[in-house]
Amino acid sequence: MDKTKKDRKRITLSQIIPTNPEGVNVFILTLLLTGFGLVMVYSASSYAASMSDSLGGNSYYYLTGQLRAAIVGMVIMAVIVIINSTFFTSKLSPWVWVVLATISMLSIVIMKIVNPDAAIEVNGATRWVRISIGPVGMNVQPSEICKMLVIILYAKLLPAYKGLTRKMSGYAILMIPALYIAGLIAAIANNFSGAIIVVGTAFMMIMIVSYKPRLDGSGIAWLGIYIGIIVAGAVLVVMKRWNRVVTWYLLWSDPSKVDAGDEAFQPVQSLYAIGSGGIFGKGIGGSIQKLKFLPESQNDMIFSIICEETGIFGGIMVIAAFVALLGVLYMVARRVNNLHSSLLVFGVFFHIALQTVINICVATCVFPNTGVTLPFISQGGSALIMALAEIGLVLNVAKQIED
Amino acid sequence: MNVINAIINYFKEQILEDISLVKDEKAKAKAQPKPVKIVRTARLRVFLFYVIVILLFGIAIARVIFLNIDKGEEYKRTVLSQLSYSGTTLPYQRGDIVDAKGTTLAYSQKVYNIIIDTSIIGYYSDRAADVEGFNGQYAGNTVDALWNYFGKDMTADDSGRLTTKEELRNFIISEINKPEGERSRYLVFAKRQSYEKMDAFNEAKSEAFANDVSSDVTTKFDNIYGVSFEEEYVRYYPNGSLAADVIGFTEPGNKGSYGIEQYYNDYLNGTDGREFGYYNYDLNQERNIVPAVDGNTVVLTLDSNVQRIVEEKINAFYDEYANNYREGEGGAHNIGCIVMEVDTGAVLAMASAPGFDLNDAKDPYEYFTLEELQKMQDEALEEARIAAGVSLNAQSEDVNEPVNEDIKTEDEDEPEEEGEEGEESEDQGFGPSSVATVVTLPGEQDSNGIYSSVKTNALATLWSNFCVTSTYEPGSVAKPFTVAIGLDSGALSGKEEFDCVGEIATGGGAKIRCGHAGHFNVADSVAWSCNVALVKMGRIIGKENYLNYFGTFNFGQKTNIDLTGEAFTESLVFNQATMGPTELDTCAFGQGFNVTMIQMASAFCSLVNGGYYYQPRMVSKIINSDGAVVENIEPKMLRQTISNSTSEKIIEYCKGVVDYGTGKRAKAYGYSVGGKTGTAQVRDRTSPDRVCSFMGFAPTEDPKYLVYVVIDTPNLPVQSEGTGKAAGICKDIFTEILPYLNVFMTEELTEEEQAELQELGLYNANIYKPQESETVLINSVEMQIDEATGYAIDPETGAWVDPETGFPIEDAETLYIQEGADIEEETTNE
């Protein structure tokens, strides 16, 4: 702890590289996960990329993109760390973040009209916007930006408005900004899982600061409404994705009986990959499933490839790394006595926890199939950049830690 | 390690602290300043959430471990086997169909479809997109190269837009200009190109690439991208329409339709091979090939030379009498002909007219004029209208048509004075105009307004094998069977004589007529085809004998010939319950029950080969792609139908038919032919339609081959004349095939016959030599000494052999002609 004191006295470098133990832990774990992610993205994608005519047979295609995103993400992380820690707690109106989120989502719509070539459509959903500065271009996914903006927004909102939670109706009011942004994500980018992550993160952040709400007459009425909405929503989702639910059930009973031609193909292949790994796996680069059979193997299903190539051991190590990362995030939040700052960290905590749990549980068929990526590891530039930026927020907060 | 230790330590400390926090939170709460309290509450809740997350991770880990322990081995195998199922499919080659002499009748050839993937052209031109006009250049180069090699075979795409080079080029450019995911990846440029063409194209392409690397010279076929080849096998029938009914054709996916192609589909098809990549132990990618197993070759008993002769003859009739009496129709509704080897049941030829081209079987306009299709459609519409009308007026209509019992048969070479038909009973009430219902037929209408169902029906009739699928009443050809049943069962002795006054009343009161009157013994009854005599014989034989022998001759059963679509006639013959006195009478001369041609031919073989019934067969063996015999199909003798002596008598009676009876026209040059004529009425006894047929066999000394000709509804003003024509066709066929099949002539030729044979090129060593010549044993073969030359004749080859040395005489050709001249002189001297 004495060391920390000394280090804080250094000026520029200490502003970027965290020096207190909490910060160091967060930073090291982030580097580990990102580095491992680069290895796995290359391993999982190189064969498919080299076979792809549209990628020109370039086996480094995904690795290059991911590496570039990692570098950009690190730079953004550094910038966020350097920013005065009061920037996010400043008088800046919370609505700035709502406006920013709106603009970033609307950029897709605008791009579609202004420059259709820069609005990248895949499978009927426009999720990316191409930003070109001179010869260097990058595809940005606005919904990933929104996830971080929601964390900052609620960290700013909640300390001021947490009193609302004394009444049941207050929860509805507090959810409005998150629902609005989630609505934009779902409507414009057709990104259902992204919207769920946004709502889930905001909801968890509200829950941790909430007071015990009064359960008077109107309170019970509101509770009834919430339960009604949740049940209706759940029913709607289950009905819309009924096939996935059925598939999920079948996968628990006997995967080999599931017809591989339909929606079950990806989950079945994922189980084959995981199950065929053994204790130490087939060695990095040794996956067979990635050759052809596991769609999105470098993306949503990268955990399966990790289990196939590095076995039970590798799978447990990756999960352990995430548990540790969440643990150190928790430590950071624990060490600041400032609600706003700790909410920032908790927001990041919830975001990473939700995505990690959903992704890994989908890969192992604990949950039905949804398209959520594994933070730091899955291929996807925007997601990696924003995850690193969020870690920047955490490191920024970690700077405030005093003994 | 320090880092990890640090993490773990921190972790431990903080968690313990937080757990104690839960305990004394309330106590501490009041003491803490407000924001800190809130932070602590939040922290506690996050901690709970964290525990849930860890639990979920625990489940995931448990699942990973469980999957590995429980299903690990199974999944490892699944993963590997999945891998081997993937990769490129290498199509197998469907086996050939060859005739008895090895002539190929059907084979499959590998061809290549040329596919353009515009996204690949687009990818390369995108990379060069800085230079204006590259899209056009890359597309242009690719199209130019393709056009140069496959241009004339270019297939317009589905919508028919792209027919010229320019259009194709513009289309590709427009595709390239689309965003990446929307470019067409599958554009068929040309179909079914030969290997040679594909190879030439690839060579030019690789040369162009080589030039690119080695020098800056840009060749003509530079920058060709996005062209790929799909392998496919196409079925070819080198002889076109020859034996079309027998062979059948294939649908896409090697699915046989009709004939041998369908019946032997499983033998002809092979197993697809695979080509796949995998990683070896050193993680290098390997390629592995499991070769395809090609299909087996089916060897027919059919002889394509005999088949060709048969088809020539029946087609000649079909064409000659087309439009003869009924305008707009061929020479008959159908003409069928079967040539069989009497002693084995092997089919040497099977044909029907009209035929079709196997290479182009599916275009109805190829075989039917628009008017014909129109007519068929009108008839079908009429029927549909009547059906609609009947269903509307079902109660008011009496559908039971009185059956006209007035039955008669006629035979060629007979006057037909008493041919007065029974009274008209065409008083059915519903005319086509009585119900004005709009009716449609199934299927879609084409540009000519013809429904697809009409076309399908028309083609199905054409494709079906008349010789095994169609049933008809055999008529007088059945008379030898009646006589054989009588003789073999002992009911007849062969010495009976019958009086005929031209007609006889059946048990049912109807009259059976006969074209003549007189006093006939058994032989003459057959020779003159006397209905009355046969009815009388039938009555002597009796119902029990008749039904027993019918089963023995296989009537009412399938012959199980190895062809698709054989008709099952059980319901079309009489049984114990349905055969009354009238039926017995009609059966005796071949009316009232239905048969297929192959049934008749097979049963007749047993009449003339000593009484042995062989299952008719088309295939003699099946050999695999390496030439090894997979299966030999031997002649299958099923049962003895009649005794040897009965068979001899039948041969004698049938010889009489040709020698002096109704079948004189079937006499083949130089051979003694036996046979039986048949002119059968059709189901509707008032109709003028006849099924004219002739069953012939030769030589009568030891019957070897059987020819059965059936002309269904000849296009003649007097249809019964068709029977003589059938006998004539039989004669033409025998005259040509017997010398080809190396059957020695047993009778002298007249001058005209000789001239005709010489013209046909059939005047060869099989010619009958009237001289009683000595025989000599040369090389342990018994050879005849020819008196004119003094040389011996090798019975195998017909070549001349020096009796002293046993060596063949070289100039046999010239000697044949001299010999021919000698015979001519002798015959003129007589």
Image: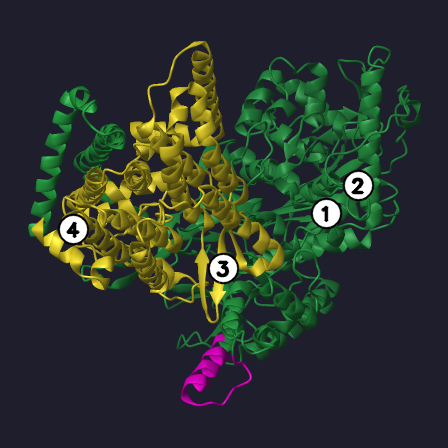
Chain colours: A yellow, B green
Q: How far apart are marks 1 and 3 (CA)?
A: 87 Å
**Marks 1 and 2 on same chain:** yes
Marked residue chain, label 4: A
- Residue nearer the viewer, A341 or B816: A341
Upstream in sequence: badge 3 or badge 4: 4
- Circles 1 and 2: CB atoms closer than 8 Å: yes
Q: Can residue B392 be seen in this view?
A: yes
Q: Where is residue B541 in the image (x, y as percent from the top left)?
A: 62, 20
Label annotation for residue A130: 3
Of the numbered discs in the image, which one, if any, rests on residue B772? Answer: none
**Percent coordinates x, y for residue B122 in the rendering:** 54, 67
Does B582 appear above or below B279?
Answer: above
**What is the chief secondary structure element of the magenta stretch?**
helix
Q: Mark 1 lies on which chain?
A: B
Span colored in magenta? B202-222
**Amino acid identity at mark 3:** Arg
Quickly name the residue at label 4.
A20
Kindly identify which chain the residue marked by label 2 belongs to: B
Identity, as a three-letter code, of the amino acid under mark 1: Ala
In the image, is B414 to the left or to the right of A243?
A: right
Point out the frontmost of discs 3 and 2: 3
Residue B412: mark in rendering: 2
Quarter residue B755 falls in: bottom right
Marks 4 and 1 belong to one chain: no
- Whether marks 3 and 4 lie on the same chain: yes
Q: Is mark 1 on a helix, strand or loop?
A: helix
Q: Is residue B123 above or below residue B355?
A: below
